[in-house]
Amino acid sequence: MSEHRPAGIVTRGLAALLDLGVVLAGMGGLYLSWALMRLLFSPQQFSFPDVEVVMSVTTCSALSVLYLAACWATTGRTIGAVVMGLRVVGRDGRLMGWIRAVVRAGFCVVFPVGLIVVAGPRRRSLQDIVLRTVVVYDWQPDPHLAEPHAGR
């Protein structure tokens, strides 16, 4: 693992709240896009689309997994992590790769309670323990992490 300190529950929680805001803003953008398309194709009968709970939860979950996985696989940072100075990496300090990022994102969306259980001196959540990842304080960008195939 790198020389960075493991992040605590408060910092991780604030980053997660910021990321939730990003996902909700994305959901709002999708809804407004849908409404605009309806307006463009039938302006005479326009009404705002009805939102079904199941479809909203499914879309929000899918958008969350996509957002988290893409951020973790490419830079190790979501927008919330950038603001809070965090990075999610494997135990060796490198990016976790696409498969593990997608699995971790799905695990976080389906079982968010596992993120609350940040325990021990290494401050690992259930997701970190199972997937062998760690959330560290990392204010400085690491050019080697942005390029997973770069030699170290």
Image (spheres, rainbow, N blue to C red):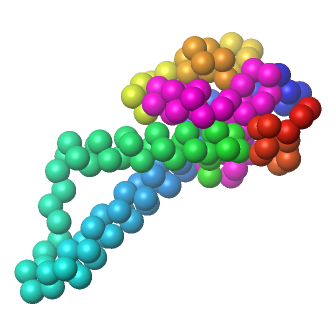
Picture mark count: 0
Q: Is residue 100 left or right of residue 87?
A: left
* Residue nearest the observer in this picture, 95 or 13: 95
**Residue 90 drawn in magenta:** yes
Residue extending farthest right: 152
Residue range of the region highlighted in magenta in the rendering: 80-108
At a point 72% along the width and 25% down the height, the residue shown is 90
The quarter in which the N terminus is drawn is top right
- Horizontal and vertical percent position of residue 117: 54, 19
**Residue 33 drawn in magenta:** no
Do we see residue 6 in this rendering?
yes
At a point 68% along the width and 13% down the height, the residue shown is 120
Q: Quadrant of residue 92?
A: top right
Q: Quadrant of residue 128?
A: top right
Up the image or down, 145 lies above or below 89; here it is below
* Residue nearest the observer in this picture, 113 or 43: 43
At a point 32% along the width and 70% down the height, the residue shown is 32
Do we see residue 17 in this rendering?
no
- Horizontal and vertical percent position of residue 81: 66, 45
Up the image or down, 98 lies above or below 14; here it is above
The quarter in which the C terminus is drawn is top right
- Horizontal and vertical percent position of residue 89: 72, 30
At a point 28% along the width and 76% down the height, the residue shown is 36
Q: Quadrant of residue 145?
A: top right
- Horizontal and vertical percent position of residue 26: 43, 59
Residue extending farthest bottom: 44
Up the image or down, 135 lies above or below 69; here it is above
